[in-house]
Image (spheres, rainbow, N blue to C red):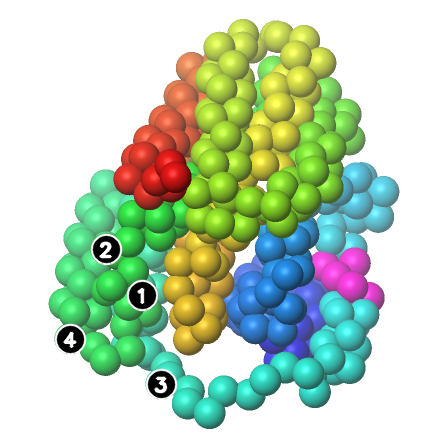
């Protein structure tokens, strides 16, 4: 966790100072490595250090902030760009990282050390990275030719097949096979992936519509986007409290399921909006989405971290963030592709591509909701 913070802080400084696009991309890659180290260990630190009576509340608070980051980030970023310029998007991380690192340094003596460590699955992670990058290239691809996209699809299929074969034989798989037999785990992972992707679409599409369709300024579009984090903040304290009182799987899963339902309804509403709908209507629907996220994140994290024992906490925490980040990247590529097809050859913006992207996000949320409802039904507590 501390090494990840350090790497993230240094790379943030390098991003802000980058003199060229190539160096910015390289520094961003390093920043992603540091972020992965922090994200993968944060929840495990909570479950191994915080006493059991306070653990659910602590996980609820952590989940709220994990959800608030990607939801509030685009809105705050819009204001930073307008006021200070893009380099400050990265430099603003430095004092935050410094404060977190000092706090972690002071707490390091209370963190129990593990006698037995698992070996790093380098081959499996490499195959996973190749598969994901190839899939993203095939989906997004920018100006890539049809042959290049086909090569990306084939590379993704071959990489995925090789990963599946390797993980079946490996003694330290990325995700232990037994977890895939647990319906609560599957529902939690599908849920966090769907929400991560839908959230990325939720902040890709409104500025596109408001700036290009309604000719708003970037800071005005950011104000509309800011309604989603306000919705999450409105339910952040109640969500943490509810997570504390319903720490059992079925209770936390019930909260997460309710959040998925609210978010799916909000996305359906967004898909039905006309191009020139009032900005306040879009803001209200994004606020509703944020409220759903405020319910989902604490419930889902508490559910997922309760699936395994002490030896699986780091794995569960890292898989949760991996699912969120992977589908965020995939849905940005899908949304960009749909918008690109709708405005190809200089065509004026219409709601066709935008609506397709909203519908796609809604369908992923409904799919996650169906898995959560099935997991709830199969693991419902037996009446006394």
Q: Position of residue 285 (x, y in %)?
A: 61, 19
> Over which residues does the magenta segment extend?
90-96
Are the residues flagged by discs 1 and 3 in contact, CB closer than 8 Å? no
Residue 94 on the magenta segment:
yes
Quarter containing the C terminus: top left
Q: Which residue is mark 1?
A: 175
Q: Which residue is mark 2?
A: 181
Q: Which residue is mark 4?
A: 169
Quarter containing the N terminus: bottom right
Mark sitting earlier along the chain (1/4): 4
Mark sitting earlier along the chain (4/2): 4
What's the CA distance linking mark 1 and mark 3?
Answer: 13 Å
Circle 4 residues within 10 Å: few <14, some 14–19, many ≥20: few
What's the CA distance linking mark 1 and mark 4?
Answer: 12 Å
- Does residue 212 appear in this view? no
Q: Is residue 203 above or below residue 109?
A: above
């Amino acid at each position: 966790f501390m090494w990840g913070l350090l790497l993230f802080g240094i790379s943030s400084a390098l991003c802000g100072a980058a003199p060229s696009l190539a160096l910015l991309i390289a520094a961003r890659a390093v920043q992603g490595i540091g972020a992965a180290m922090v994200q993968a260990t944060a929840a495990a630190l909570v479950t191994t250090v915080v006493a059991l009576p306070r653990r659910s509340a602590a996980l609820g608070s952590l989940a709220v902030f994990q959800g608030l980051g990607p939801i509030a980030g685009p809105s705050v970023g819009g204001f930073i760009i307008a006021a200070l310029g893009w380099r400050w998007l990265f430099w603003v991380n430095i004092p935050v990282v410094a404060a977190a690192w000092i706090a972690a340094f002071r707490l390091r003596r209370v963190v129990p050390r593990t006698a037995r460590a698992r070996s790093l699955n380098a081959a499996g992670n490499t195959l996973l990275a190749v598969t994901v990058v190839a899939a993203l290239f095939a989906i997004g691809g920018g100006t890539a030719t049809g042959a290049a996209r086909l090569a990306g699809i084939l590379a993704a299929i071959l990489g995925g097949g090789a990963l599946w074969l390797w993980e079946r034989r490996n003694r330290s798989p990325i995700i232990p096979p037994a977890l895939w037999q647990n319906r609560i785990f599957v529902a939690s992972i599908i849920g966090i992936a769907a929400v991560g992707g839908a959230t990325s679409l939720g902040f890709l599409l409104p500025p596109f519509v408001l700036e290009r369709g309604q000719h708003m300024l970037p800071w005005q579009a950011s104000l509309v986007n800011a309604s989603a984090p306000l919705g999450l903040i409105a339910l952040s304290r109640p969500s943490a409290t509810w997570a504390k009182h319903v720490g059992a799987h079925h209770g936390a899963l019930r909260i997460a399921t309710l959040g998925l339902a609210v978010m799916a309804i909000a996305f359906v509403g967004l898909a039905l909006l006309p191009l020139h709908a009032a900005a306040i209507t879009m803001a209200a629907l994004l606020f509703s989405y944020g409220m759903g996220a405020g319910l989902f994140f604490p419930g889902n994290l508490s559910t997922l971290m309760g699936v395994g024992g002490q030896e699986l906490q780091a794995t569960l925490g890292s898989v949760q963030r991996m699912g969120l980040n992977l589908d965020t990247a995939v849905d940005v590529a899908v949304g960009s592709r749909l918008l690109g097809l709708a405005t190809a050859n200089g065509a004026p913006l219409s709601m066709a591509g935008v609506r397709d992207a909203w519908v796609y996000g809604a369908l992923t949320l409904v799919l996650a909701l169906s898995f959560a409802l099935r997991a709830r039904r199969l693991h419902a507590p037996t009446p006394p």
